[in-house]
Image (cartoon, helix red, strand yellow):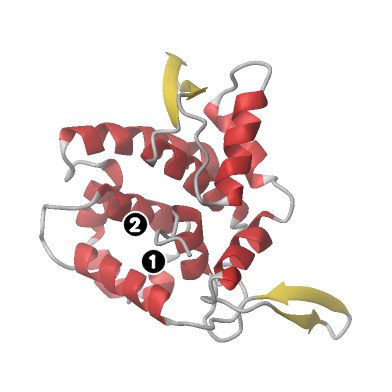
């Protein structure tokens, strides 16, 4: 069992209702998940972004060593096999359109007995996959971790925490886990984390790149 819960898996935990296993947000989760995958590859130093002109960044593969996740490895393989370098926005779209993307992300968590796979019916006719929590501890630790970062003034913030907060903020998932009024009071800090201004220089450069990924995912 791998120790790391990757960014797209953390985002999925935040997006799923614990008891019903359905997606919390009515918006499409695929593009935020795609941003999480590319952000993870940036964090793991598998890819880098090269700015070629204003508002256009090309994705460069710098290390094709596999990770302990089939979705990340599929993304790496697609980038490696691409006939030419493509823009970040193009890769966000490709990742978002991976076959059964959100279900595959959830099933990875099922394999580790964090979620369980089940089915229900929509309008008593159409079957759909649902993923109720089997082990609530990983999500509880994640929410506690984010709470500590958001609602304190500690300036020592791990890049991974800043990234998942930025992703969850743009996917409108933070308000599903925390009180809206409390979040509003911490709006400035959340923005600072999302922009990387509370991070060290190396992390700030990473957050600058990841913010480009997020913008590509939501624009």
Q: Residue at x 56, y 86 (%)?
A: 19
Structural crowding at the residue carrying mark 1, measured as other residues with C-alpha within 10 Å and reported as few (<14), some (14–19) or many (≥20):
many
> Distance between the Cα atoms at labels 1 and 2?
8 Å
Q: Residue at x 69, y 46 (%)?
A: 98
Q: Is residue 29 found left or right of 212 in the rendered image?
A: right
Of badges 1 and 2, the one in the foreground is 2
Structural crowding at the residue carrying mark 2, measured as other residues with C-alpha within 10 Å and reported as few (<14), some (14–19) or many (≥20):
many
Q: Which residue is mark 1?
A: 174
Q: Nearer the viewer, residue 173 or 19?
A: 19
Q: Nearer the viewer, residue 203 or 193?
A: 203
Q: Is residue 133 found left or right of 118 in the rendered image?
A: left
Visible residue check, residue 144: yes
Asked if residue 142 is positioned above or below residue 208 in the image, the reply reads below
Residue 133's quadrant in the figure? bottom right
Q: Quadrant of the C terminus?
A: top right
Q: Residue at x 10, y 59 (%)?
A: 154
Q: Secondary structure at mark 1?
A: helix
The x, y position of residue 13, in whole percent, is: 49, 69
Q: Secondary structure at mark 2?
A: helix
Q: Tell me, yes or no, whether the two marked residues, 1 and 2, touch with CB atoms within 8 Å.
A: yes
Residue 118's quadrant in the figure? bottom right
Residue sitting farthest toward the top: 52
Q: Which mark is residue 73?
A: none
Q: Which residue is mark 2?
A: 165
Q: Nearer the viewer, residue 190 or 15?
A: 15
Residue sitting farthest toward the right: 125
Visible residue check, residue 219: no
Q: Residue at x 48, y 22 (%)?
A: 57
The x, y position of residue 111, in whole percent, is: 59, 70
The x, y position of residue 208, in whole percent, is: 32, 34
Asked if residue 144 is positioned above or below residue 172 in the image, the reply reads below
């Amino acid at each position: 069992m791998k120790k790391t819960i990757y960014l797209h898996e953390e985002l999925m935990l935040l997006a799923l209702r614990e008891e019903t296993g359905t997606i919390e947000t009515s918006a499409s989760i695929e593009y935020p998940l795609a941003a999480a995958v590319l952000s993870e590859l940036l964090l793991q130093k598998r890819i880098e972004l090269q700015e070629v002109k204003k508002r256009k960044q090309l994705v460069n593969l710098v290390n094709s060593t596999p990770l302990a996740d089939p979705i990340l490895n599929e993304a790496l393989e697609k980038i490696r096999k691409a006939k030419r370098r493509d823009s970040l926005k193009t890769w966000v779209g490709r990742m978002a359109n991976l076959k059964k993307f959100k279900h595959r992300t959830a099933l990875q968590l099922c394999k580790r007995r964090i979620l369980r796979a089940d089915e229900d019916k929509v309008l008593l006719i159409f079957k759909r996959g649902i993923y109720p929590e089997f082990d609530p501890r990983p999500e509880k630790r994640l929410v506690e971790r984010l709470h500590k970062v958001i609602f304190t003034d500690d300036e020592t913030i791990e890049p991974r925490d800043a990234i998942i907060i930025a992703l969850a903020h743009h996917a409108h998932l933070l308000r599903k886990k925390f009180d809206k009024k409390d979040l509003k009071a911490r709006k400035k800090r959340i923005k600072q984390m999302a922009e990387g201004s509370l991070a060290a220089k190396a992390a700030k450069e990473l957050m600058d790149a990841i913010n480009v990924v997020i913008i590509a995912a939501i624009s």
